[in-house]
Amino acid sequence: MYDDIIVLTDENGADIRFALLDVVPYEGDDYAVLLPADEDAEMFTILRADPDPADPEDYLFCGIDEQEIIDAVFAMFQERHPELFGESPAD
């Protein structure tokens, strides 16, 4: 279904596959919007996406504690992808 699949390791050492839906720039940082790839999940995950110094084509993902950033990034994601929410793209 999704082309960009990444594998992240959780705090227990378990690998979890995510679809990378978009990278949204917000206030000087990039934020990855992810969806679990192996489930029928509708819960999005948003992580800060820092450039990997070892590989500039890749990211290092960091959790976000500030709810206002999560809300703002998700709102921007919704505006960029209305088709994922049953809406037609604005012309």
Image (cartoon, rainbow, N blue to C red):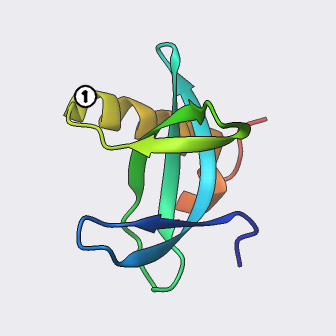
Residue occupying the point 70% across, 71% down: 2
Measured as percent of width and height from the top left, residue 51 is found at: 60, 31
Residue occupying the point 40% across, 47% down: 46
Quadrant of residue 55 within the rendered picture: top right
Rate crowding at label 1 as few (under 14), some (14 to 19) or many (20 or more) other CA atoms within 10 Å: few
Measured as percent of width and height from the top left, residue 18 is found at: 53, 68
Dot 1: element: helix
Establish if 38 lies above or below 6: below
* Residue at which label 1 appears: 68
Farthest residue to the bottom: give it. 39
Farthest residue to the front: give it. 54
Residue occupying the point 41% across, 71% down: 42
Measured as percent of width and height from the top left, residue 75 is found at: 44, 37
**Mark 1: amino acid:** Glu
For residue 49, side relative to residue 13 (left or right): right
- Say which quadrant the C terminus sits in: top right
For residue 44, side relative to residue 38 (left or right): left
Farthest residue to the top: give it. 28
- Say which quadrant the N terminus sits in: bottom right
